[in-house]
Image (tube, rainbow, N blue to C red):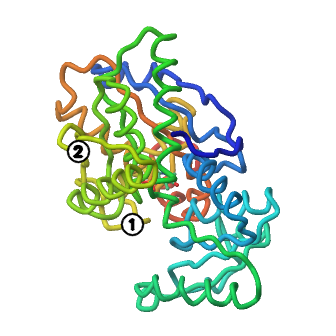
Amino acid sequence: MIPDKLNLAQLPTPLQFLPRLSAELAGPRIWVKRDDLTGCAASGNKVRKLEFVLARAIAEGADTLLTCGGLQSNHCRATAVLGAQLGLKVHLILRGEPPEQPPDGNLLLDSLVGAEISCYPQNQYQHLPELIAHWLDFYRSRGRKPFVIPTGASDGIGIWGYLHSVSELACQFRELEIKPDAIVCATGSGGTQAGLTLGCHLSQLDISVVGFAVCDDAAYFHNKIREDISDWTRRYGTSVDMTQVAIQVNDRYIGPGYGRATAEVFSTIRHMASLEGLILDPVYTGKAFYGLIQEIKAGAFQGASDIVFIHTGGLFGLYAQRDELGIQLKSSASGLIE
Ligand SMILES: *Cc1c(COP(=O)(O)O)cnc(C)c1O
């Protein structure tokens, strides 16, 4: 059974070959699935998930969307923009201290599109279920119909987005006459990887899906991805033999923590931007791409002919870290800044 879906994303997104990087690595050919081009103010991978989640919210008669994430959450910003586009009120529950300076990056856009924003420091945000319950009561007692979207829109509904994207990919693989060995993505709340993994399993494409964790460890994501898939089976009355579903998480490139990147990651961002005109971000795609390059150099994908990297977006996160990026650009010998 296929659920309701809104048409919000610009699809199909291009699948592009990276000729110079592939030559430089002298290993498998590297392709990028440009899901940074799904549209909706650069909403990246989130719009694929929200096409299904927001269809559900509207079907339930919701007039208010409640969701949560970090201060610079791409998911929260995508929800805020799409809420405005659909005429729904959006309330964001954000983790972190409200900034003293004018808002930047995603947070700037959240306020621009008129989202209600509540910031909670970590010691309060850790009681997220209570915070959500509080705001649910708040809206219900005022006669509104709130709908809660979990972190990253990653649940049994949201994973339809990337489940669906697998047929789009399969079609492009046929057109390009390639048979990739691996699909690689950044993993933050697990929904993208869960959808891709389930999609490849169900369509019996013999491709491994590898997620590069950007925050929590492999054990956490194995569990989370399983949960999202079982939520999907429960909601839609399907069954999946989980023993046949290979969940592969690489958690060796998280670095200092969520949202914090090492100089190597910034250097990769800079390299990819100048080598291929491909703009990555320091929170998700830059970290995962750095990990992918390291793993290829270490021989982890030996024998692979083609690898597809899912560019999940995140552009505004780059602006929010302009200072860190500036240091990297200055210290490099490119001659651009000096
Ligand atoms: C949210 C996000 C991810 C992670 O996707 P999940 O489905 O949450 O694991 C990756 N890249 C970008 C740019 C994101 O905004």
Q: Is residue 54 above or below residue 94?
A: above
Residue drawn at x 62%, y 89% is 137
Residue drawn at x 40%, y 13% is 178
Residue type marked 2: Met
Residue 70 disc label? none
SS at mark 1 in the image: loop
Residue 152 in the image: state x and y as whole percent: 50, 60
Residue type marked 1: Tyr
Residue 61 in the image: state x and y as whole percent: 72, 65
How packed mark 1 is, by other alpha carbons closer than 10 Å (few <14, some 14-19, many 20 or more), is some
The residue tagged 2 is: 242
Residue drawn at x 45%, y 54% is 235
Residue 123 in the image: state x and y as whole percent: 41, 91
Label 1 C-beta lies within 8 Å of the nearest ligand 1 atom: no
Q: Which quarter of the figure has residue 148?
A: bottom right
Label 2 C-beta lies within 8 Å of the nearest ligand 1 atom: no
Horizontally, residue 101 falls left or right of residue 95, namely right
Residue 28 in the image: state x and y as whole percent: 30, 21
Horizontally, residue 79 falls left or right of residue 190, namely right
SS at mark 2 in the image: helix
Mark 2 to mark 1 CA distance (whole Å): 29 Å
The residue tagged 1 is: 258
Q: Which quarter of the figure has residue 135?
A: bottom right
Residue drawn at x 32%, y 48% is 212
Question: Could you tell which of marks 2 and 1 lies nearer the N-terminus?
Answer: 2
How packed mark 2 is, by other alpha carbons closer than 10 Å (few <14, some 14-19, many 20 or more), is few
- Observer-nearest of 220 and 123: 220
Q: Residue furthest front?
A: 237
Q: Is residue 306 above or below residue 192?
A: above
For the residues carrying marks 2 and 1, which lies nearer the camera in this image? Answer: 2
Q: Is residue 223 above or below residue 36?
A: below
